[in-house]
Image (cartoon, rainbow, N blue to C red):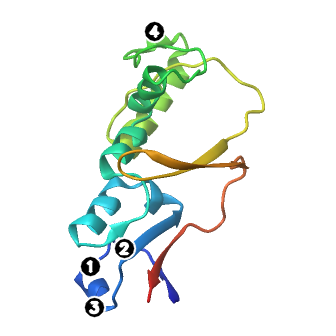
Amino acid sequence: MKLRKAFRPPAKQDLRHDVDAIHPGYGFLSERSDFAKACLDTGITYIGPSPEVMARIGDKVAARQAAIEAGVQVIPGTATPITNAEEATVAEAFRRAFSEAQAAFGDGSLFVEKFVGRPRHIEVQLLGTNSKISSIETVASNRSLPRTQLDCWIFDN
């Protein structure tokens, strides 16, 4: 098996290389629902969540609501997005955050959470099928430090 880096959606030429599946690795491609959909549309198995799940989790407000609905304890904060500076009570920070969210995601929706000093970003990976979780990875990984290289690996036979 050979490994080669890919920084583009899969295309028909990938099929000529007998590509059966793509795992996006870590980084931006692993968070893009359009990349997962492009894999599936091309007939390549995408190793990761469905595009629909990725789209919902990529929307932080929807992800927070999904966590609440699933009974996951979340940091106390607003239940729905705030829409104006008066609700935020920190007008300048609100305007800056709204502007950044609008520019980056095309949606300025914000929600307010309780401040947590020295937070850690801990991830737990799940392995499953389309219908159920078949195994749970029990080792949590600390993602508090940013990765220096974001890449995707395509596994070729």
The C terminus sits in image quarter:
bottom left
Query: Which residue shows up at 42% across the image and 28% down it?
Result: 66
Alpha carbon distance from label 4 to label 3: 55 Å
Query: How packed is label 3: few (under 14 Cα within 10 Å), some, or many (20 or more)?
Result: few
**Discs 4/3, front:** 3
**Discs 1/4, front:** 1
Residue contact at pointers 4 and 2, CB within 8 angstroms: no
Q: Amino acid at mark 3?
A: Arg
**Discs 1/3, front:** 3
Q: Amino acid at mark 4?
A: Glu
Residue contact at pointers 2 and 1, CB within 8 angstroms: yes
**Label whose residue precedes the other's in the sequence (3 or 2):** 2
Alpha carbon distance from label 2 to label 1: 9 Å
Q: Amino acid at mark 1?
A: Ala
Q: Residue furthest right?
A: 118
Circle 2 SS class: loop
Q: Which residue is mark 3?
A: 16
Alpha carbon distance from label 3 to label 2: 16 Å
Q: Which residue is mark 4?
A: 87
Q: Which residue is mark 2?
A: 8
Q: Amino acid at mark 2?
A: Arg
**Discs 2/1, front:** 1
Q: Nearer the viewer, residue 9 or 91?
A: 9
**Label whose residue precedes the other's in the sequence (1 or 4):** 1
Q: Nearer the viewer, residue 150 or 89?
A: 150
